[in-house]
Structure formats: C-alpha cells, structure tokens
Image: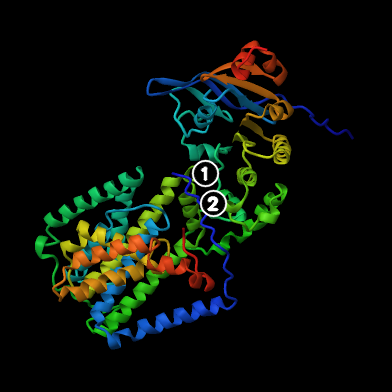
C-alpha cells in the first residue's frame, strides 16, 4: 500500500449539458456497427475480437478495478476452452451447458489460485499466479482429455437451447455478440455496486479499509473469482467459435497478451481493454499474412503507447478535453 | 412513586487492556512490558518523545502488528491472536498518523464506505450503487455533526489537511465504535481546528473510550483524564496530567531538560 493520492486535478472542464445524449448516441452507433459488421467483415474474425475483448475486460476487472496484476489468466481462458470443448464433444452437452461448465470450471480454478496468490502483494502476487498457471499448463499437456499437443479438435457448435443452429456463422455471430454484451454488463454492474465500492476503497487505501473492519483478502478473492469466471466465459465461447481448444490458450504468452491488450486500451475503463484487444487481434490478423514479424510490430506499438499514451488509448481519450466534455471519467 | 436515581458516575470500567505487551523487531525491542487500561467514557493519552514506540503500541493494540509477548483483551475477550479487521468489527477502530481517507471518493462516499458493512451492504455485487442511497441520511448527519457539510461532494483529496483528519474521525465514528484509537488526531492542524477537534473528541468520549497519541500537551492537559508516558518502549509514568507532569523522570525524558 502506498499513498498514491497525487491529486490529478487538472483544470475544471464543464460537462456538456447534453453529454448524456451524446454518450447515448455514441453507444447507438457502436451497437449498430456491431450488428451490421458481419455484413462487411469476416465473421470469424469479428467473433475473435469479441471473445478477446471480453477476456481483456474480465482481466481488467482485476487489474483496473482491484489493483491486482495477474500473470496467470490464460489458465482460466484456456482451461474453460478445454472444459467446454470436452463437454460438448465427448459428453454431447448442448453449447449453453458446455459454456456454463467452462465458466464454473474457471471460477473453481480462480478460487484455488486466488486463495493462494492473494496472500502476497505486487510482484509476488504476479509471480505466484504465473507459477500456478504454468502448473496448469503442464497439467493440460499431460492430461488425457486435452489430447496434449493435438488439442481437442472439431468441436461441434450444436444447437443453442435446442433452437438455434450455431453451425450457421451468422447465428453464431449474434450469439457471441449477446454473450459479449452480457459479460460487459456483468462487469459494469460488478464495478458499480456496493461490492465495487468496497473494492475501490481497498484500492485507494487498504490499511484504512482493514481498520474499518473489511476483510480485505475476501473482497480481493471475490473479484479474482469473478474475473476468472468471466475469462472462462470468453474461453468457452472461443472454443465454440474456432471449434477447437489448444495449449496456446493456456500458455503464459496468452497471459502476457491479455496484459498487453488491457494496457494498450487503458486500464480502469470498461471500453479500454476491448479496444486494446481489438487492436492486438487486428494487428495479428493482418500481419500474419505479411512478411512483417508480428511480435516485433506489437512490441513497438506497445512501447509507443506506454511512452505516449500513458493511460492507454481509451484512457487518454476519456481524460482529454473532449472526453471530459462528453462526461467520461477514467478510473485513476 | 419514586424514580431510580440516575447514576451520574459509573465505576471506571476497562474496555481495552494490555498486560506485559512487547514487540521485538529482529532483535530490537521496540515495546517492552507495557500494561495499559483504557476505560469507558475516559480519554487516555499516550505521550512520549519521538521513537518511544507510541505508534507501535497502537499497531499492537489494533492487531496491525502481532505482539511478541503479552496479552490484549477487548471488552472482556482475548484478542491477542485476532486479525485486525475482526478487531475492528468487535468495536475497536483506529485512525492513522498519516491521514487515512479514500482520496478519490467524495466526503460522503468516504463516510458511506464505513457505513456499508454494519448496514449489510458490502457484498452485493449484483445491486446498483443506488442501493447505498439509504445510507445518505446517516452519512449526512455525521458530516453535519463534524462541520463538513460544505464539502460533502468534494473529493477527499481536495480537502485541506485539517479537514482530511476531521473526515477521518467522521468515518471512524460512522462505525459507532466502543473504543477509538486516534493516532495524533491534531497533528498539522491550525489552532481553530485543534479547538474544534478537541471538542469533538470530548463529546464522543462521553459514551466511548478514547486512546490517543498526541504531541500537543495543552490539549492533553485540557481533555485527557489519564496520561501514560512511554520512553524507549517502556512506560515510565502513568496517572492524571498533574501527577505525570510533576514526575521528574518524565521531565527529563519528555522535555529533554531538567528545569
């Protein structure tokens, strides 16, 4: 804990009187764009954006709103992908039940990893989560049901609630969009709730929160489990989108990637991680076919962002004159 | 018909006690053999030169530090091994030497955070923030009581130093604690604020026990019923202000000179 209370009070900017309408209009434009996007862009690519956007937003619940840097979130994302894929393919479960299993499995993993890791703070916390997720990686490498290096291939998408055939790409897209919106709504509610208020107070001054009688580690664990569960939601959906689950999704590189996405977009905002995920996934997609080395390009983009946009793309926009005029506020 | 006589003066009743309290840090004894009784409806001051171990005693009593030796009881219960958040829930609430507010929350939100737990509104992650509106009335009452109403919607970070301390007291009082531990509540305050805070402390101590670390001896003489003097981690004198200030050891140790 440190008194990180340097007042970021800049000059007061009057919020535009019709800022509520402007934000609503902005939301409507984004909603329309998401609804119409598969007419113009490759739907699988869009679904990948949504899945990673949700993953990054779930990660940010922990980093941005609780102040905990986890270096092991791939375990929840990739673990859920395995659980969902196995339930749907081997046990013949319907997709909604498979995803639910992924979410519950990720939450259970989160409970175990979180209970161990939250005893330490800062870099130690990050290292413990990394170590535990590496253990899970080797478990996935060895366990029979994951099929090691092969992964679980050709996972059927099935029929959602027995009604909607998800093998139809457009149906699948709208299903993924609905899950994405649901996930963001859950995060938004979680952050703006009585529980979220206590999380915020813990982030601001942990010692004081303890002295007011709050069992800080339980609140952190609650946030950790919620973040793991939502990362699992993203992972389960991803397994159905691509119809396979592999070791890539549980690797430490995936844990690093989600940190990159979140920092690029801006921590402590709901939209930031989604935008950051969009940027990284888009770069990977378009550079994959070119001769440019992807990792170097994303690395350079990351460095530029850290140097120029300290708060991330969306964070900078929210903190700008225009952003504040429209009434946006970034978490500090 | 007769009415039972009103008890004007209840028997002194120790609500927080320490016996043989000690703390070692890697071979260095910071606090040794401290016996302390904080009584209901009394203001007890803990004074001593810098480095005497006053804040360490505070941290031990509130369980932010684990004692090496000794025993602590709160309201008749042994809390020697209890966690700090549990101790707070049992009715022992402390303030900090460096003002402890939630800087990016408003004054009202600061107080409401303290009210949330007793009201059973701390774990609901599915409810909107408006669920906390029913705490507004109580929060505003406390804010008004401590004269912070003009700053109710200001962020705590934007308050003056003195007002941050007052806000901290408001937040502490929101828990309605049985025992208050105030670590230098008046440090860095202007003369007027000192007056006001002294009055507030005197007022709240009518129904609670208060233990405070304070350097301002005028205030200690003025409002404290009992004074304990600490030097190099040990108690060198205890009693009312007149007794303690007349003690030659205190005069040498605390004042630094023999007049």
Its colouring scheme is rainbow
Q: Is residue B181 left or right of residue A276?
A: right
For this view, does A42 lie left or right of residue B47? left
Residue assigned mark 1 = A208
Nearest-to-viewer mark from 2 and 1: 2
Between A171 and B237, the residue placed more toward the observer is B237
Q: Residue at x 16, y 61 (%)?
A: A247
> Where's the N terminus of chain B, which quadrant?
top right
Regarding residue A35, the answer to whether it shows in the image is yes
Extreme bottom residue here?
Answer: A39
Q: Nearer the viewer, residue A64 or B6?
A: A64
**Which is more toward the observer, A117 or B161?**
B161
Note whether A276 is above or below B231 in the view shown. below
The location of residue B230, given as percent across then percent down, is 57, 20
Residues flagged by tags 2 and 1 on a common chain: no
- Quarter of the figure with residue A177: bottom left
Q: Position of residue A222 (x, y in %)?
A: 40, 53
Residue B65 versus residue A254 in the image, above or below = above
Q: Chain of mark 1?
A: A
Residue B176, quarter of picture: top right
Give the residue drawn at x 83%, y 32%. B4
Secondary structure type for disc 1 = helix
Q: Give the percent coordinates (x, y) of residue A272.
A: 38, 67
Q: Residue B17's mark?
A: none
Q: In this figure, which residue is indicated by the disc labeled 2?
A: B103
Q: Quadrant of the C terminus of chain B?
A: top right
Q: Quadrant of residue A178?
A: bottom left
């Amino acid at each position: 804990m440190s008194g990180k209370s340097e007042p970021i009070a800049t000059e007061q900017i009057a919020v535009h009187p019709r800022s509520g309408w402007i934000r609503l209009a902005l939301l409507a434009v984004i909603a329309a764009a998401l609804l119409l996007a598969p007419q113009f862009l490759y739907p699988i690519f869009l679904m990948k954006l949504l899945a990673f956007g949700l993953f990054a937003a779930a990660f940010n619940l922990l980093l941005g709103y609780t102040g905990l840097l986890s270096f092991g979130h791939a375990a929840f994302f990739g673990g859920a992908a395995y659980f969902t894929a196995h339930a749907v393919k081997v046990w013949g479960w319907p997709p909604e039940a498979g995803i639910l299993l992924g979410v519950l499995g990720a939450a259970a993993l989160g409970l175990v990893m979180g209970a161990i890791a939250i005893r330490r703070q800062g870099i130690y916390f990050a290292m413990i989560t990394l170590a535990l997720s590496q253990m899970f990686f080797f478990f996935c490498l060895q366990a029979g049901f994951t099929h090691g290096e092969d992964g679980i291939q050709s996972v059927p998408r099935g029929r959602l609630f027995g009604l909607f055939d998800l093998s139809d790409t457009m149906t699948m897209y709208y299903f993924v969009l609905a899950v994405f919106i649901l996930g963001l709504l859950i995060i938004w509610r979680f952050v703006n709730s009585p529980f979220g208020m206590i999380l915020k107070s813990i982030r601001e001054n942990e010692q004081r929160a303890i002295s007011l009688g709050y069992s800080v580690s339980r609140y952190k664990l609650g946030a950790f489990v919620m973040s793991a569960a939502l990362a699992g939601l993203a992972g389960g959906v991803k397994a159905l989108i691509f119809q396979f689950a592999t070791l890539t999704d549980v690797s430490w590189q995936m844990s690093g990637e989600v940190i990159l996405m979140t920092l690029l977009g801006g921590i402590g905002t709901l939209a930031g991680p989604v935008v950051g995920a969009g940027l990284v996934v888009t770069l990977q997609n378009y550079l994959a076919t070119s001769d440019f080395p992807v990792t170097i390009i994303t690395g350079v983009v990351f460095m530029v962002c850290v140097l120029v946009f300290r708060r991330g793309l969306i964070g900078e926009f929210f903190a700008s004159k225009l952003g504040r005029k429209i009434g946006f506020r970034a978490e500090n | 018909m007769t009415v039972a006589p009103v008890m004007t003066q209840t028997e002194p009743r120790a609500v927080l006690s320490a016996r043989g309290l000690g703390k070692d840090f890697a071979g260095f004894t910071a606090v040794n053999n401290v016996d302390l009784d904080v009584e209901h409806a009394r203001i007890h001051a803990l004074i001593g030169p810098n480095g005497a171990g006053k804040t360490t005693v505070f941290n031990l009593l509130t369980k932010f530090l684990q004692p090496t030796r000794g025993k602590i009881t709160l309201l008749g219960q042994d809390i020697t091994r209890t966690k700090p958040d549990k101790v707070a829930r049992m009715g022992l609430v402390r303030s900090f030497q460096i003002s402890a507010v939630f800087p990016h929350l408003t004054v009202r939100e600061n107080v409401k955070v303290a009210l949330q737990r007793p009201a059973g509104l701390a774990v609901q992650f599915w409810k909107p923030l408006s669920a906390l509106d029913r705490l507004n009335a109580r929060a505003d009452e406390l804010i008004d009581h401590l004269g912070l109403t003009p700053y109710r919607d200001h962020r705590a970070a934007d308050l003056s130093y003195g007002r941050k301390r007052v806000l901290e007291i408001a937040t502490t009082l929101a828990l309605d604690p049985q025992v208050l531990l105030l670590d230098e509540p008046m440090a860095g305050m202007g003369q007027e604020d000192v007056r006001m805070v002294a009055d507030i402390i005197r007022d709240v101590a009518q129904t609670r026990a208060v233990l405070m670390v304070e350097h301002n001896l005028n205030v200690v003489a003025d409002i404290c019923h009992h004074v304990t003097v600490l030097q190099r981690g040990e108690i060198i004198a205890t009693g009312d202000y007149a007794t303690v200030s007349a003690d030659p050891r205190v005069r040498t140790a605390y004042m630094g000179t023999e007049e």
